[in-house]
C-alpha cells in the first residue's frame, strides 16, 4: 500500500517523464528536414509501457498524430512481440490504418533497454513532404495511387539501419533528401527520449517503469471518470454538412455520457468518397477524443488512462470509418471537422461552454512543379514540392472573440512565408487578415486571411487543394452569424475548385481567401466600442458595423451615438 510520500514521489516522476517526452519532441523538430516538421511542428512523440499503453505525450505535436499514435504501438507489438525485441532495434510504418491515417505520416517505434532489460517503448510520428503517388492531392481513387505504402517492418536491427528500405523510399519520392532526413530524425528523437529516460531512472533509482506507469494510468482514469460523472448524463445528437469532393458530406454524431464513459456514435454519416478525403477510424478516434477532452478534461494529462474513457463507433464504409483500399491522403478534411460536431452535441448538455464553429479544416498551401506535374516550358525551371501550413479563423467563444488565422483543432504552427520563398521559386505578395470574414456576434468570430502567390520563374506551378468551408460556412452559435466562406481563384478572376490538383499558369497569381469563424450570441449585444475598435483595426468595415451590429461609425472608428441608438432601437 502506497504512502502519501510515495504518491508525491510518483507525481514528481510523472512530471519529469512529461519533460522527457517534450525533449524527445524538440529533438525531432530541431533535426527534421521538412518544413511541416521543422517549422509547423506537425509531429508527435511519447513513451509507452511494454503493453503498448501511452504513459506520456509531448505537448509539442498535433492531436491527430498524438491520439492516433497512442493506439498505434499495439499494432507494432502484434508484429514484433516485446520478448523478441533487441537493443538497437527500430521499427517503422506509414500504414494509414495502423498509424496516423495517411501515407505521408511515418510512425517510428523504438524499444528502450536499461541495464539489459527492456523498460519502455518510445514512439514518434512526422509528416513527410512527399511519399510519391499523386502527391498531397485528393485526386487519387485508391490508396495505391497515393504513394509508397510501408507495412510495419524494421528500420534498424541491432543498430544497423535498413538500407534496403531507405533505398526503396528514396526511389519512390520526389524529395529524397528531405524524406530520408526526416526518417533519421524520427529515429534520433526516440534515442534522445531514451537517454533522458535513463538519466531519470538513475536519479530516482528505478529498475523499470511498472509502478510509475500503473500510477499514471490509475490516477488519470480516476480523474477523468470523476470529471465525466459530474456532467449531465444522457444522449445528444448533432449534424454538420461540409463541402466534400464529388458531393456534400453529412457528419452525424450521437454523444452519450454514462457511468464514467463518453461514447460517440457516427451512425448516419455519409458513406465513403471515391476520392482521397476518406478518414480511417484511427484518425476519427483521435480527433473525437480531442474534441471531448477539450471541454471535459482539458487539464488532465493525455495518456492511455484518459483516452480509454472516450469510445467511438461508426458503421463500416462511412466517411469516418473508411476501409482499405480507400484513398485517404486528405483524411484531415474530415478529421479536423469532428470537434465541431462534438461541440454541437456538448452545447446541448453544457450551454455557455462551447465555441461556435470555426474554419477547422487547415488551408495548407500545397504547391508543386516539375516534370509530369506541370506543363513543359522551353526554359529550365525548378522542380519542387512544398507543404506550408496556414489557417482560417476559429469560432467565437462564449465570453471571448474567436482567434484569427488560428489552426484549431490541429494546433500546427504557421510556416513563415520567408521559409517557403527560400526553398522554392514562389513569392507571397500578400498575406493579411481578411476584413469582415469573422462571423458577427456578441463575440465576433476569428478572421480568416488572404494570400496572393506567384512564381519568380516564368513557369506554371500547381496547387494540391483540399479546402473546406467554401460551400458551407462555419455556423455561429446562439444567434451569432456565420463566418465567411473561403475562395480560391486566379488573379485574372477565374475561380478554382476547392479540391484537387490545378495548374496556375505562368505569370498568373493565385488568390486564396480563407474562411472566418462563426460568431457567438446576438450581434447587437456586442459592445459598441468593441465594434468601433474592430473598425479602427481594419477587422470590420464601416458597412458591416452598421449592417450586422447596428453601430454607425466613421472611417476612423468614431461612433455616431444618435444613429447607433436608432439602429439598435
Image (tube, rainbow, N blue to C red):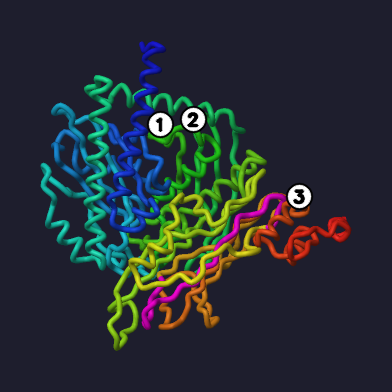
Relative to residue 451, is residue 116 depicted above or below? above
Name the N-terminal-most of marks 2 and 1.
2
Name the N-terminal-most of marks 3 and 1.
1
**Which residue is situated farthest in the bottom direction here?**
378
> Dividing the image into 4 quarters, which one contains the C terminus?
bottom right
Spatial distance from mark 2 to mark 3, Cα to Cα?
Answer: 38 Å
Mark in front: 2 vs 3: 3
| Disc 2 packing (10 Å; few <14; some 14–19; many ≥20) | many
Question: In the image, residue 12 lies at what x, y percent?
Answer: 38, 23
Res 103 seen here: no
**Residue in the image at 70% along x and 55% along y:** 533
Q: Nearer the viewer, residue 385 or 102?
A: 385
Question: In the image, residue 52 lies at what x, y percent?
Answer: 29, 36
Spatial distance from mark 2 to mark 1, Cα to Cα?
Answer: 8 Å
Spatial distance from mark 3 to mark 1, Cα to Cα?
Answer: 44 Å
Q: Which residue is mark 3?
A: 527
Q: Magenta part of the protein: which range? A: 440-463
Task: Tell me if label 2 and label 1 are in contact, CB under 8 Å.
Answer: yes
Relative to residue 507, is residue 189 depicted above or below? above
**Residue in the image at 26% along x and 48% along y:** 186
Res 183 seen here: yes
Tell me where residue 192 sits by quadrant: top left
Q: Which mark is residue 305?
A: 1
**Residue in the image at 46% along x and 70% along y:** 428
Relative to residue 514, is residue 348 depicted above or below? above
Q: Which residue is mark 2?
A: 224
Amino acid at each position: 500500500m502506497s504512502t502519501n510520500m510515495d504518491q508525491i514521489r510518483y507525481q514528481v516522476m510523472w512530471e519529469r517523464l512529461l519533460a522527457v517526452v517534450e525533449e524527445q519532441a524538440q529533438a525531432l523538430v530541431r533535426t527534421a528536414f521538412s518544413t511541416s516538421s521543422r517549422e509547423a511542428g506537425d509531429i508527435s512523440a511519447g513513451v509507452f509501457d511494454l503493453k503498448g499503453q501511452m504513459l506520456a505525450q509531448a505537448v509539442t505535436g498535433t492531436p491527430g498524430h498524438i491520439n492516433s499514435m497512442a493506439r498505434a504501438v499495439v499494432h507494432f507489438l502484434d508484429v514484433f512481440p516485446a520478448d523478441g525485441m533487441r537493443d538497437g532495434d527500430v521499427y517503422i510504418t506509414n500504414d494509414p490504418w495502423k498509424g496516423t491515417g495517411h501515407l505521408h505520416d511515418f510512425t517510428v517505434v523504438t524499444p528502450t533497454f536499461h541495464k539489459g532489460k527492456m523498460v519502455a517503448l518510445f514512439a514518434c510520428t512526422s509528416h513527410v513532404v512527399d511519399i510519391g503517388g499523386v502527391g498531397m492531392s485528393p485526386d487519387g481513387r485508391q490508396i495505391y495511387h497515393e504513394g509508397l505504402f510501408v507495412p510495419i517492418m524494421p528500420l534498424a536491427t541491432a543498430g544497423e539501419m535498413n538500407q534496403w528500405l531507405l533505398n526503396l523510399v528514396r526511389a519512390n519520392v520526389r524529395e529524397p533528401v528531405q524524406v530520408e532526413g526526416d526518417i533519421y530524425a524520427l529515429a534520433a528523437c526516440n534515442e534522445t527520449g531514451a537517454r533522458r529516460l535513463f538519466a531519470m531512472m538513475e536519479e530516482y533509482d528505478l529498475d523499470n517503469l511498472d509502478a510509475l506507469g500503473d500510477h499514471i494510468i490509475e490516477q488519470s482514469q480516476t480523474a477523468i471518470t470523476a470529471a465525466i460523472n459530474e456532467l449531465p448524463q444522457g444522449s445528444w445528437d448533432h449534424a454538420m454538412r461540409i463541402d466534400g469532393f464529388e458531393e456534400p458530406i453529412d457528419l452525424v454524431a450521437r454523444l452519450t455520457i454514462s457511468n464514467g464513459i463518453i461514447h460517440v456514435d457516427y451512425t448516419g454519416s455519409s458513406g465513403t468518397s471515391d476520392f482521397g478525403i476518406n478518414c480511417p477510424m484511427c484518425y476519427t478516434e483521435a480527433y473525437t477524443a480531442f474534441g471531448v477532452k477539450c471541454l471535459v478534461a482539458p487539464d488532465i494529462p493525455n495518456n492511455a488512462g484518459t483516452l480509454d474513457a472516450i469510445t467511438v463507433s461508426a458503421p463500416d464504409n462511412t466517411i469516418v470509418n473508411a476501409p482499405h483500399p480507400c484513398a485517404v491522403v486528405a483524411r484531415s478534411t474530415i478529421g479536423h471537422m469532428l470537434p465541431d460536431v462534438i461541440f454541437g452535441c456538448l452545447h446541448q448538455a453544457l450551454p455557455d461552454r462551447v465555441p461556435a464553429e470555426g474554419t477547422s479544416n487547415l488551408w495548407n498551401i500545397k504547391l508543386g512543379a516539375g516534370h509530369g506535374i506541370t506543363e513543359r516550358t522551353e526554359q529550365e525551371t525548378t522542380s519542387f514540392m512544398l507543404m506550408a501550413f496556414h489557417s482560417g479563423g476559429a469560432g467565437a467563444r462564449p465570453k471571448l472573440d474567436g482567434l484569427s488565422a488560428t489552426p484549431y483543432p490541429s494546433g500546427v504552427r504557421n510556416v513563415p512565408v520567408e521559409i517557403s520563398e527560400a526553398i522554392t521559386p514562389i513569392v507571397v505578395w500578400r498575406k493579411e487578415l481578411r476584413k469582415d470574414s469573422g462571423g458577427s456576434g456578441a463575440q465576433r468570430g476569428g478572421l480568416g486571411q488572404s494570400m496572393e502567390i506567384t512564381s519568380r520563374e516564368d513557369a506554371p506551378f500547381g496547387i494540391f487543394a483540399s479546402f473546406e468551408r467554401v460551400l458551407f460556412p462555419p455556423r455561429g452559435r446562439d444567434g451569432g452569424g456565420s463566418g465567411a466562406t473561403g475562395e480560391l481563384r486566379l488573379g485574372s478572376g477565374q475561380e478554382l475548385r476547392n479540391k484537387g490538383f490545378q495548374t496556375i499558369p505562368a505569370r498568373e497569381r493565385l488568390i486564396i481567401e480563407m474562411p472566418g469563424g462563426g460568431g457567438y450570441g446576438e450581434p447587437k449585444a456586442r459592445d459598441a466600442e468593441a465594434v468601433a475598435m474592430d473598425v479602427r483595426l481594419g477587422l470590420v468595415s464601416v458597412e458591416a458595423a452598421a449592417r450586422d451590429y447596428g453601430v454607425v461609425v466613421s472611417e476612423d472608428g468614431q461612433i455616431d451615438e444618435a444613429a447607433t441608438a436608432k439602429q439598435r432601437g
